[in-house]
Amino acid sequence: MGMMVINPDGVAVRTTMDSTHTNSYSAILSRLTDQARSAIRDLDPLNEVTFIRLRSRKNEILIAPDKEFNLIVVQTPADVESNHAKQSTQ
Amino acid sequence: MGMMVINPDGVAVRTTMDSTHTNSYSAILSRLTDQARSAIRDLDPLNEVTFIRLRSRKNEILIAPDKEFNLIVVQTPADVESNHAKQSTQ
């Protein structure tokens, strides 16, 4: 898991993840952030996306889009962690 | 604000919103749900999106994507509501 700061070109300027994950996450999540931003604007031109939370079976992705930079956090939700702990003790 | 159930073709089969909002929200949010689904799958083919929360300045959109149907809830967050209340009493 980890976090990164992405510039307007979709390039990570800070990251705690390895380069492979950083490159794929920054490219894919920058594109999704832009898609979410235009979806909100299509619905209401006077509105603006301020936070995106994407929960999946394996992790949770939090995106704080800003004018200049996007902050992305990838974390393992508590319930997924406890499942892993149970499996490793069986 | 309101809620709707969208079928795989992006058509609302249940809705509490007027038809104009239902048509625009169902079309735009179905597309965004598909984009989120493929973003998660691009990052990890064995993973699957289970919930999307999209916070914007004016409202909060909750999307529970399922195999067959997507449930979409559009709500006004408490802090936005209290701002409206303050403005109307000034």
Image (cartoon, coloured by chain):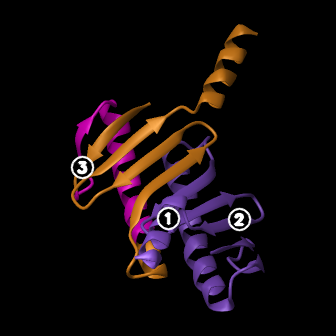
Chain colours: A orange, B purple
Q: Which mark is residue A86?
A: none
Q: What's under tag 1, amino acid-wise? A: Ser
Indicate which label's residue lies in the foreground, 3 or 2.
Answer: 2
> What residue range appears in magenta?
A8-37
Q: Position of residue A25 (x, y in %)?
A: 39, 45
Q: CA distance from mark 3 to mark 1?
A: 38 Å
Q: CA distance from mark 3 to mark 2?
A: 32 Å
SS for callout 2: strand
Q: Chain for mark 2?
A: B
Q: CA distance from mark 2 to mark 1?
A: 30 Å
Report the quarter where the N terminus of chain A lies: top left
Considering depth in this image, is A8 or B77 the residue closer to the camera?
B77
Q: What's under tag 3, amino acid-wise? A: Val
Q: Which residue is mark 1?
A: B82
Q: Position of residue B68 (x, y in %)?
A: 78, 63
Residue at 64 percent across and 40 percent down: it is A57
Q: Residue furthest bottom?
A: B20
Residue A11 colored in magenta in the image: yes
Q: Residue A84, located in which quarter of the rendered image? A: top right
Indicate which label's residue lies in the foreground, 3 or 1.
Answer: 1
Q: Which residue is mark 2?
A: B70
Q: Residue furthest top?
A: A89
Against A51, residue A88 (above or below) is above
- Specify whether residue B58 is in view: no
Q: Position of residue B29 (x, y in %)?
A: 57, 71
Rate crowding at label 1 as few (under 14), some (14 to 19) or many (20 or more) other CA atoms within 10 Å: few
Residue B74 colored in magenta in the image: no
Q: Chain for mark 3?
A: A
Q: Which residue is mark 3?
A: A11
